[in-house]
Image (cartoon, rainbow, N blue to C red):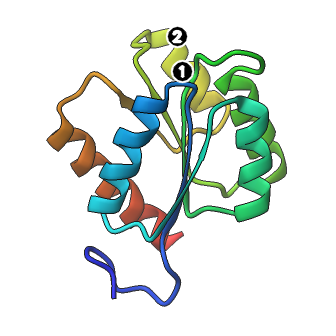
Amino acid sequence: MHKEFDMAEPLSALTVDDDQHMRVFLRTLLKLAGVDKVWEASTGPEGLEAFFQHKPTITLLDLSMPGRTGLEILALIKKTNPGAVVIVCTSVNEHNIVLECERLGATGFLLKTRKKEDLLAALKEFLKKASKA
């Protein structure tokens, strides 16, 4: 039984962010939201590999990382798995970036600068949508 959802399959998540503190913070929020398993990656290529290995319920993807950017990883994930739930989680708040994320198929967009409570509420909503997909 999950804290927030009554599902047959356990909820899982992947966080892809080069900032270790942010990965720990997001893992904590995801656990509070009822996610059973959280995988982490610190680079785009690691994230891509982890995505295909684990097939998470939801993926939180940073945009600014060394090597391949979050936009490149988003495009690769959506090209091979159009139904994947990928949430762009970034501190970049530019209209053209949001539009590009939407064009590439991002399920949603979270600003890291939002309050913890707001991020948690948004994650719960994304997880509800993902569990119905």
- Point out residue 30 in the picture as x, y percentages from the top left corner: 37, 55
Residue sitting at 34 percent across and 26 percent down? 112
Type of residue at label 2?
A: Asn
User: Which residue is depicted at the point 40% across and 30% down?
Assistant: 21
Q: Mark 1: give few (<14), some (14-19) or many (20+) Cα within 10 Å.
A: few
Residue at 65% in and 26% down: 70
Q: Where does residue 43 sit, x and y in percent of width and height?
A: 69, 29
Choose top left, top right, bottom left or bottom right for residue 113: top left
Q: Which residue is mark 2?
A: 96
User: In the rendered view, does 8 fall on the left or right side of 118?
Assistant: right
Distance (Cα) linking label 1 and label 2? 5 Å
The residue tagged with tag 2: helix, strand or loop?
A: helix
Image position of 132 with respect to 56: above or below: below
- Quick one: 80 or 103, which is closer to the camera? 80
Is 107 placed above or below 83 here?
A: above
Up/down of 42 relative to 97, above or below: below
Q: Quadrant of the N terminus?
A: bottom left
How far across and how far down the image is residue 3, in percent?
A: 26, 76
Front-most of residues 62 and 87:
62
- Per the rendering, the mark at residue 99 is 1
Kind of residue indicated by mark 1: Leu
**Which quadrant of the rendered structure holds the C terminus?**
bottom right
Q: Between residues 48 and 99, which one lies in front from this camera angle? A: 48
Could you tell me residue 92's position as x and y percent?
Answer: 44, 13
Residue 75 numbered tag = none
Dividing the picture into quadrants, the one containing residue 79 is top right
The secondary structure type at the circle numbered 1 is helix
32 left or right of 79 in image: left
- Asked if marks 1 and 2 touch (Cβ < 8 Å), the reply is yes
Q: Is residue 110 visible?
A: yes
